[in-house]
């Protein structure tokens, strides 16, 4: 009976793995076209922005990406941000016009290598740029530090309330000794 359960678990696990590989392969062969929900902007990466430029032309988009280079031209007051996808050999330019008048110009210190969430209007086909609307820095290291702090609290709590049965490879609830009341 124990062998049947083990075989059944291995079979279910194998079906899940093979199914996920199959659907991942289908997603690679037939990538989904970016879709828009109501008035929300397209959340898109650099490769999809380049590949589906005709779909997102003159539409609002959001890109979460690290900045590879930037240039600020004081005379024309234009901030140009360059984002690369080295795997596909693609470079996209995001241009913020009137950067000194932008509400984030004094708050954000643009740094190469940091990740940013950039909202803009795709004009790749007509002008070859993305016209920037808003930019927010993503603090990935803060999230990682908070995750590590959470793990340092959760793991000891798990071992405080449970013990590991290595033969069956599962957690067993530790039972507290009941105090003798009335004695």
Image (cartoon, rainbow, N blue to C red):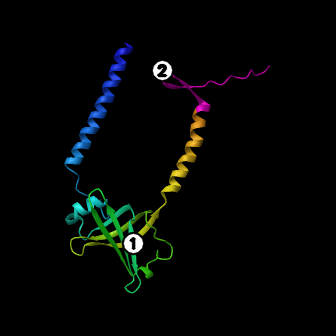
The first of marks 2 and 1 along the sequence is 1
Q: Quadrant of the C terminus?
A: top right
The residue singled out by tag 1 in the image is 70
Query: Vertically, is 28 above or below 93?
Result: above
The residue singled out by tag 2 in the image is 168
Q: Based on the displayed image, in which of its 4 quarters is residue 180 positioned? A: top right
Tell me if residue 161 can be seen: yes
Q: Position of residue 164 (x, y in %)?
A: 54, 25
How far is the residue under mark 2 from the one under mark 1?
Answer: 56 Å
Q: Nearer the viewer, residue 34 or 49?
A: 49
- Span shown in magenta: 159-183
Q: Is residue 118 found left or right of 168 in the rendered image?
A: left
The kind of secondary structure element at disc 1 is strand
Q: Which mark is residue 103?
A: none
Q: Based on the displayed image, in which of its 4 quarters is residue 72 positioned? A: bottom left
Which residue does the image show at 45% across and 70% down from the upper left?
110
Q: Nearer the viewer, mark 2 or mark 1?
A: 1
Q: Nearer the viewer, residue 73 or 132?
A: 73
């Amino acid at each position: 009976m124990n062998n049947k359960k083990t075989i059944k678990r291995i079979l279910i696990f194998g079906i899940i793995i093979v199914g996920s590989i199959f659907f991942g392969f289908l997603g690679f062969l037939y990538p989904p076209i970016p879709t828009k929900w109501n008035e929300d902007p397209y959340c898109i990466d650099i490769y999809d922005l380049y590949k589906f430029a005709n779909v997102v032309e003159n539409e609002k988009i959001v890109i979460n990406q690290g900045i590879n280079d930037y240039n600020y031209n004081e005379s024309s007051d234009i901030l140009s941000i360059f984002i690369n996808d080295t795997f596909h050999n693609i470079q996209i330019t995001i241009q913020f016009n009137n950067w000194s008048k932008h509400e984030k110009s004094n708050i954000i210190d643009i740094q190469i290598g940091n990740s940013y969430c950039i909202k803009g209007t795709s004009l790749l086909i007509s002008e070859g740029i993305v016209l920037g609307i808003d930019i927010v820095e993503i603090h990935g290291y803060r999230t990682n530090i908070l995750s590590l702090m959470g793990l340092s609290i959760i793991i000891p709590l798990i071992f405080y309330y449970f013990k590991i049965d290595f033969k069956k490879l599962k957690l067993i609830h530790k039972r507290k000794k009941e105090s003798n009341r009335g004695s």
